Image (cartoon, rainbow, N blue to C red):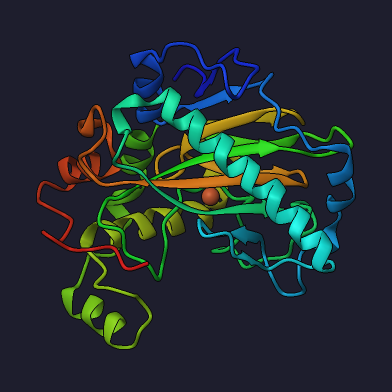
Amino acid sequence: MPSPIVELDLDDWGATPEARPEWTAAVEAGKVLWFPRLAFAVRPDERALLRENMLAPKSRNVSLSADGVLKGAGGDGAEQASLAAMVGRFRAQALALVDALFPAYRGALTAAPTSFRPRRVETRRQSVRADDRRMHVDAFPSRPNYGERILRVFANINPEGAPRVWRVGGDFESVARHFLPGAKPYRAWQARALQALHVTKSLRSEYDHLMLQLHDRMKYDERWQQQGEQWRVPFAAGSCWVCYSDQAVHAVMEGQYMMEQTLYLPPGREANPAASPLQILTRLVGRPLAGVGAGVAR
Ligand SMILES: [Fe+2]
């Protein structure tokens, strides 16, 4: 497979040139769009916010909701207000970038809270299933999404110039073909039990079940983690990148201080829905996988 990274030469968040259909096609093919010269500008007075204890104890990330509520932040009140302003500025720029890059999605996207991630990736200790240094596709155990797409914008804002290093894997369909044969079969009664026990916020569909199986089977396969098709990609400080994290196989190996914005796209609203994980898995399994009319609980 050719490299999964597509470099784009934009350097100004507000001056995106006329969108090209191939950008949407690339991101929908599971590629990572990388903007090496598009930096999120941290202002001099914001530099002091780039420290690990701007994260509250026990929080994984700082998040800012659409209505401006900041969660998970350390620091004092004034610092939290500055942090909210900085994260909010990234949110506005990320949403504008996505709007300019993918005009086909206009009116269909829902923005999640924006996150600031000040923790160093290398020293994080986690279980195999939670360890994002193992290649995976994103899938949520508690929040079934029925094929809703997870589009993410990332910016490396490391003040010392440290890259954010990812490993990016082979294309989704090849990886799915590799791992699907050993996946546990979906059981509707188990899905109902998980919902009754509030393990899931709504009924887990067969699509959600298979995505979690892929996520877990990838992470637990030591040999595939080492020998599976992959590219090591150092995303430089002062760059940003965009991908569908439910489709682009990825692992986060190194780095500290990042901004991230997630947007959700309803299934079927892609320019080419046939390239989506839902339709790929549906074809591979040979029957419909997502509950009809099911809603996503947030
Ligand atoms: Fe991930």
Q: Is residue 165 left or right of residue 112?
A: right
x, y percentage for residue 209?
29, 62
Q: Nearer the viewer, residue 195 or 84?
A: 84
| Furthest residue toward bottom | 197
- The residue located at (74%, 54%) in the rendering is 83
x, y percentage for residue 165?
70, 36
x, y percentage for residue 7?
57, 16
Q: Nearer the viewer, residue 65 or 288?
A: 65
- The residue located at (66%, 23%) in the rendering is 38
Count of picture labels: 0
Looking at the image, is 134 positioned above or below residue 10? below
- The residue located at (39%, 39%) in the rendering is 175
Q: Is residue 228 left or right of residue 123?
A: left
x, y percentage for residue 49?
84, 52
Do we see residue 260 in this rendering? yes
Looking at the image, is 115 positioned above or below residue 195? above
Looking at the image, is 280 positioned above or below residue 137? above
- Point out the image quarter for the N terminus: top left
Q: Nearer the viewer, residue 20 or 13?
A: 13
- Point out the image quarter for the C terminus: bottom left
Do we see residue 119 in this rendering? no
Q: Quadrant of residue 29?
A: top left
Q: Quadrant of residue 281?
A: top left
